[in-house]
Image (tube, helix red, strand yellow):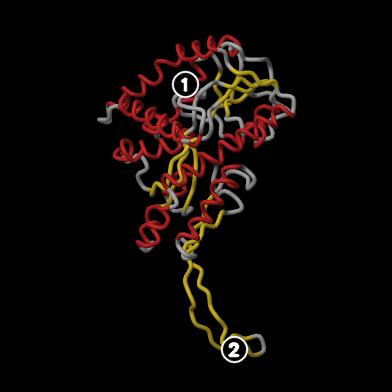
Amino acid sequence: MRVIRLVTAVALTCGVILSSSPVSAATTLRLSSWLPPGHPIVRDMIKPWADQVAEATKGRVKIAILPKPLGKPPAHFDLAKDGVADVTYGVHGYQPGRFLLTKAVEMPFLGNSAESVSVAYWRIHEKHLAKANEHDGVTLLSVFTHGPGEIFNSKRPIKSTADLNGLKIRVGGGVVNDVAQAIGATALLKPAPKSYELMSNGVADGVFFPQESIASFKLTKLVRHATLIPNGLYNTSFFLVMNSKTFASLPKEDQDAIMSVSGENFARLAGKAWDNVDAIGLKKMKEDGVQVITASDSMVGEIKKATANIEQGWAKEVGSKGLDGNMIMKDLRAEISKIESAR
């Protein structure tokens, strides 16, 4: 945590401060960001939330987004845990094997709206998942997801799972890695910012991404074919966290103020922003000549059959932690449906 102390000059003589007194102490928290400033996560989610934190605390706490990341994308959970940064965001799946319960929101066919899924995710996390304490060492400010994951590639239209055979697809880790393998693709586990390099060098034939990411990562000239999956092929679980000692050092009033604009508020803010940029991303793809098709009922059936064991396997693992994975998924889907019907 960085504390900025402001002083007021009482008198100046020859450019020298003769006396000063402390006026106020503003706490500035450093946020390490691994995405460029113009990316929707930074521009439309993190920055607006930082403004809300400043407003909620009446200027006593400010979030400073650092111009350069303090580590690689997969390191960002530990950057907050170890106090290298005060606040970070990141992808749970970038660290395979570390987070189990957060995979719940990554399962196929959860919904078409990032807002509905993200808000439901926070509620279900608080109801079922928080007790497992997978975010030990940090204060969890919020969880959220991007829009429904789709199939993009440079080679051919994907009209059935058989069309994925032999294609090397960049994925972000977590459940999507299992989904990619189940439906016949060769999965390349790499952080999102590596996507352009992978595709431009021919290492990857395509990516599994939400619709906004093709434009955000400048892939519209590399991707030629898009297959949209009704209710999403997968989702990606994200965290927003603060170093626990930093959070504990803040006055209770400021802790409460920060949480009032985090949690479900941030999940909704992030989800709405993602739904908006997904729509913009789809329009941009079409303008750039990307062939966009929607998966047929037949293809959806193929995917459901191929991925059926993924959720059940997860539920079995969750059972080893004393939780009912099937009940968690039932509650998550019910909450998503409730939120979606109220929109």
Residue named by callout 1: 178
Residue 269: mark:
none
The residue at the point 50 percent across, 17 percent down is: 181
State whether residue 97 appears in this view: no
Which of these two is toward me, 270 or 309? 270
Q: What residue type is labelled 1?
A: Asp
Which of these two is toward me, 142 or 173? 142
Residue 4: where, in percent of width, then height? 51, 68
**211 sits left or right of 337 in the view:** right
Residue 248: where, in percent of width, then height? 36, 58
Residue occupying the far bottom of the picture:
13
Question: How many other residues sit within 10 Å of disc 2, few (<14), some (14-19) or many (≥20)?
Answer: few
Which of these two is toward me, 276 or 310? 276
State whether residue 270 appears in this view: yes
Q: What residue type is labelled 2?
A: Ala
**310 sits left or right of 202 in the view:** left
Residue 47: where, in percent of width, then height? 56, 51
Question: 35 above or below 30?
Answer: above
The residue at the point 51 percent across, 42 percent down is: 270
Label 1: state its secondary structure. helix
Residue named by callout 2: 11
Question: How many other residues sit within 10 Å of disc 1, few (<14), some (14-19) or many (≥20)?
Answer: some
Using the numbered discs, state the Cα–Cα distance from disc 2 to disc 1 in whole angstroms.
68 Å
The residue at the point 70 percent across, 32 percent down is: 284
Question: 22 above or below 303?
Answer: below
Question: 61 above or below 85?
Answer: below
Residue 288: where, in percent of width, then height? 74, 28
Q: Which of marks 2 and 1 is nearer the N terminus?
A: 2
